[in-house]
Amino acid sequence: MATDLRISNISKIYPGCIANDNVSLQFKSGKIYALLGENGAGKSTLVKILSGVISPDNGEVFLNEKNLKLSSPLDAKKNKIGMVFQHFNLFETLSVFENLSIDATEDNKSLRVRINEILKKYNFSIDLDVPVLNLSAGQKQKVEIIRCLLRSPKVLIMDEPTSVLTEQETEELFISLKKFCDEGILIIYITHKLKEVLSLCDEVAVMRKGKVVSVSQTQNEKVETLANKMVCQKLAKIRKKINISKNKDEIFKVKHLNFYSDDPFETNLINLNFSVKKGECLGIAGISGNGQNELFQILSGEIITPDTSIIFRNKEIAKLNPKQRREYLMAFSPEDRISQAAVPELKIFENVALNNFKSSNFFEKGLVNERKIKEHSKKILSDFSVNTDNVELKSQFLSGGNLQKLILGRELITAPELLICYNPTWGLDVGAINYIHETLIKINDQEKSTILISTDTEELLKLSDRIAVIYKGKLSKIMPSDEVTPEKLGVLMGGGSID
Amino acid sequence: MVPLIKIEKRNDVPMALYFFTPFIAIILTILGGGIIFYILGFNPIEALKFYFITPISNLYGLSELLLKATPLCLIAIGLSFCFKSNNWNIGAEGQLTFGAIVGGGVALLFYNQEGFYILPLVILAGAIGGMIFALIPAILKTYFNTNEILVSLMLVYVSKLLLDYLVVGPWSNPEGFNFPETRQFSDSSRMPLLFEGLRIHAGIFLALAAVMLSWFILYKTYLGFQIKVSGLSLKTAKYAGFKGKTMILVVFMISGACAGLAGVGEITGPIGQLHRMISPDYGFTAIIVAFLGRLNPFGIIFASLVVALTYLGAETAQIFLQIPKYTGQVFQGMILFFLLASDYLLFFKVKILNLNKNELRH
């Protein structure tokens, strides 16, 4: 029987952000649909609504013209909507069969028969009696898919399924998905990878900032046209004056940066080489999860990679830890303000003391010099217009914007020659974003350099002098940002290539 | 309708309440103890009086209280360095035993000599012994990624068996009729008594010094700052560039030295020789003391007195009520249980929901 899924005028508003803005879409079985968009475009919110994890403020979902009340994941199951999340919901120490039998309604014997039928039908080779922790990421995903198939779903939603898969596993997954589709299961495929959309899907809906901006047949699309739709086209009005001069000194140079991780949720970095000149901002674009975390930690010295060469102000610093790198006048602003750059339970002045460099005299002969730290903190609070002057306040009471100002202030008050920041305006309101952008431009004006790792293309185009894109741990060539268009960035971020 | 219990983190917990919950735990423990006595067929009021009042109603009792609180306080102070920095040293009992072995070894070397220098040497040897024994789990953790909980716990049995071997074998008293014990230490290896006729000895000053010193280190030094940050967020400690490995080694050394001091305090204080039973599990009980005292040096003084009372009370109850003295462990267990339970309610709120209702939204 054909399945028809219709989403009608769905809206979901979170404080400070509209995740879904009046979204209407229609899906019919026999086709594979792609839902494409950047981070924060609203894809995940939409699928969470479809799977009953969250409920919309407005709008309705119809399955075969029946209005669905999806107020819990259980309702989605009952209505035969299956969902495979990006991060698996499996008990690692239980066997495959135990994992599958947890929410089964039938007895073990007939369950095993049905699972074996599915394994045979789709050519999956999984040993049902080994613990899940021994499986590869691709096999774990298959277990999740089997769990959905056991309930003979009408709709199967896949949330960025290939982010943890190898090329081989991705191909296998596509073959299976096409089979499911031929059997009449409606497939909704969420991704930001353009090539996958073109090679797998029949129809594509592009989302941007909570809205559906286009629905089209993939046969009429190309990597470039999709990229154009996915990435914001409007360029920011204030843009930094591009500042590239060939004869300036290279202050920072990275050679042969390689990183291999055993953790399937980490990204390997493959032979990155780049350099930053004095007074320049190097932007590194990319969709999150393509190696930015790992890159930031290697640049800051939290991870030491043995074969990398990092030259900063003519010195080899690859083996130094973050504190030692700070002594050479580097500064770091990580993505995670709340649990990495600062500790919410600590007072403001204690968080300031985290950036303890020799000339600060915060700790003399191993003793805390509280007076010095507090003086210094007061200066940061006023210089960087944080909306409090109470250095005894616990940082958890600062808003995101004020916390970020405090962190930037702490990092910048040492007058570093190079600031490395990762998503510095993530989750902030417009006022704070503008303040931070102005600050970052000011640093470059003072002939200090920055490396800006960001998932926000608008921000990158506004602030960078040169831009490179990181995709699956590899860096594209570095381009002067006046030659970069949002479309070009979009293509590179989605794994495409430009001439 | 499926009722569902949902646990939510409370956003800001008042500090005052945080230091008050240990008292709630103690009150609940006393109530729980009363109920147990009632079930056992005793008059609960009277039994509790034997347990908590009789033992400290005379000078001798008070001295015994301080005597028992001394090792508990010392060990808990050391443990607070580990626990505050997210290092789970569970093997203080082993470090105590090894400290006692090394310190006791030195005391036995001087068994027939007198001299003012002997006791300091013995004490120093005990601290170093505990320190070395604590370095084993620390080094294995930093360089081989082992789990310090398991290693430190298992080493307890290693040191206890080593002590067993020494007191029945090479170190046993040649004139001791094969009793599993060493010679008596000479007077120069014994802790000076504070009062004639009471067992309380100079070791209590070691504990008090440890309290002051730990307060200074934890709140006034760079090391203390690093310990605090690492305990709250390891990610931040890494980002700030703290030398994580060195810090692990240092906190284990401090912790081991304190446990070793406690061990040497016992053998040079009330015991005066080495035998099999040098500690009624002070090393384990001190874990309860550390948490009951909120890992705060002054809180630990208070907690060590409370927990020491459960040891005394158990002995009194055994004498007067013929209740096995192991009820002391029941009380210690209840303290920990009620403390953890009230902490849980302090940090989280429990909501009961119905699955069909609309509140169940993520």
Image (cartoon, rainbow, N blue to C red):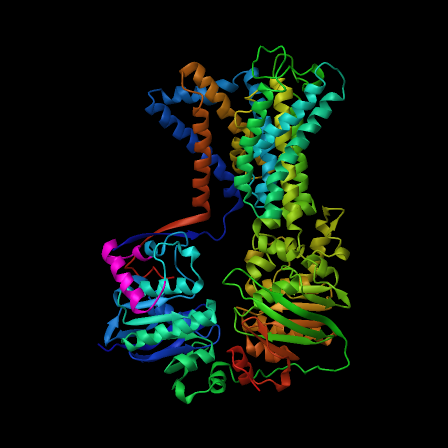
Q: Residue furthest bottom?
A: A220
Above or below, A225 against A98 in this view is below
Residue B229 shown in magenta:
no
Q: Position of residue A216 (x, y in %)?
A: 38, 86
Residue depicted at 61% across the width and 79% down the height:
A462
Residue depicted at 36% across the width and 64% down the height:
A125
Residue A123 shown in magenta:
yes
Q: Position of residue B74 (x, y in %)?
A: 61, 31
Corner quadrant of residue A373? bottom right
Image-based side of B200 in relation to A373, left or right: left
Q: Which sits in the foreground, B131 or B291?
A: B131
Name the quadrant of the N terminus of chain A: bottom left
Name the quadrant of the C terminus of chain A: bottom right
- Determine the main secondary structure of the stretch shown in magenta: helix
Q: How many marks?
A: 0
Q: Position of residue A489 (x, y in %)?
A: 55, 81
Above or below, B231 against B168 in this view is below
Q: Which sits in the foreground, B78 or A107?
A: A107
Corner quadrant of residue A23? bottom left
Write down the region rendered in magenta.
Answer: A100-125
Q: Position of residue A321 (x, y in %)?
A: 68, 57
Image-based side of A188 in relation to B2, left or right: right
Tell me if residue B225 can be seen: no
Tell me if residue B138 can be seen: yes
